[in-house]
Image (cartoon, rainbow, N blue to C red):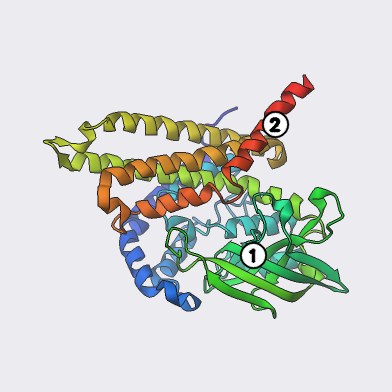
Amino acid sequence: MDFTPSKKTLEYRKRLIAFMQEHIEPIEANYHKENRRLNPDSNWRHWQVAPIVTELKAKAKQAGLWNLFLPDEKLGAGLTTLEYAPLAEVMGHSLLAPEIFNCNAPDTGNMEVLYHFGSEAQQQRWLTPLLNGEIRSVFCMTEPDVASSDATNMQASIVADGDDVVINGRKWWSTGLGHPQAKFAIVMGLTDADAPKHQRHSMVLVPLDSAGVTVERMLPAFGEYDAPYGHGEVLFDNVRVPKENVIGELGDGFKIAQGRLGPGRIHHCMRALGAAEKALQLFIRRGQERIGFGKPLLQLNGNLERVADMRIAIDQARLLTFYAAWKIDQVGAMKALAEISAIKVAAPNVLQQVVDEAIQIYGGAGMSHDTPLTALFAMARALRIADGPDAVHRTTIAKVELAKYREA
């Protein structure tokens, strides 16, 4: 196996870094201040996109730094999972960057679903405007009334009725639900409780302005509402959409979900490692600049050893993620489940560890909006739950490992 970046990756990486240094880094701190002013938490039904975001997205699109995640040379950059991974890491240095390059979750996953599994009509109606950055989307899977760590518990229903399907149920932690340009959700729900375990559920495209769709609230994560995206709770009350909105066939939900989550977890983990690099950079700068007890903080209390430990942890997690990306490209996501689960445990935990150390060296400033550290900590902690909690991924790894001994 060879993790050497391709020429295409190196060229895109160079251009991404230059764009971020010129256009994103100089404005990011002020953007977050303006975004908090523009979008108070209590006013989530009227959240707005800051004008600078629209301007930067247009520049990124013009620069050809757009849809880099999509493995299609006409619609995206035509990169493999492994080729895209270093680019996701670069974007992870900034909380804003993935949005600017149209590489932000949950839209990337939804675009991949529509690209790989959507009908031509679904692609024309929903995928094209997503690829163009004209609309946003939502993914509705997690439910408040069941243990969503076991996705087969989903009780929201998607039932055929003539030429339509009818959706009933409640979803929450649906990322992007508060965005003013969110136009539809991909909803996963139960179709046939008597079918085999992984053929019971379906995915359907639901316009958010459909009768019976009620967005009830945004949910704060560590006290922050993540405007203008938000993580919301939504009720589907006898929502009726045509059968043409079903992705694939009824009962295909789990097969599609695995295809969505494999590459998406590479994106998440590499962005997490980019964020960890940012946090390590902040740790070192703070440690060099601040003096305590007559010495730079970096020279005190084992901080140099902490730098070494963080460097080792980030590099280990990166190599593990490259390996998972390589295996997805070689044999597909379904045959790389253990590797995907491994990075899903490793990368967010590394980010959480590094950010926690950075907050500690910053003291009170590390817990404020004066640094991005609280947002990065929330990202790390949320990723240890999103797309499956650590315990579930560890169980997957153990099952694959034990199977080797049964085969022997």
Can residue 94 be seen here?
no
Q: Identify which residue, 299 or 282, lies in the foreground.
A: 299
Above or below residue 40? Residue 99 is above
Up-down relation of residue 210 to residue 126 (above or below)? below
SS class, disc 1: strand
Most foreground residue, 74 or 301: 301
SS type, badge 2: helix
Q: Which mark is residue 399?
A: none
Q: Earlier in the sequence, mark 2 or mark 1?
A: 1
**Residue kind at label 2, given as amino acid type:** Val
Q: Quadrant of residue 132?
A: bottom right
The answer to which quarter of the image holds residue 307 is top left
Q: Residue at x 38, y 32 (%)?
A: 311
**283 versus 168 height, above or below:** above
Local crowd size for mark 2, using a 10 Å CA cut-off: few (<14), some (14–19), many (≥20): few
Q: Which mark is residue 171?
A: 1
Residue plotted at (38% across, 44% down) = 355
Residue picked out by circle 2: 400
The N terminus, quarter of image: top right
Q: Residue furthest bottom?
A: 211
What residue is drawn where x is 38% and y is 74%?
Answer: 38
Give the image location of residue 23, x and y in percent. Answer: 36, 59
Q: Could you tell whether 120 is left or right of 301 in the image?
A: right
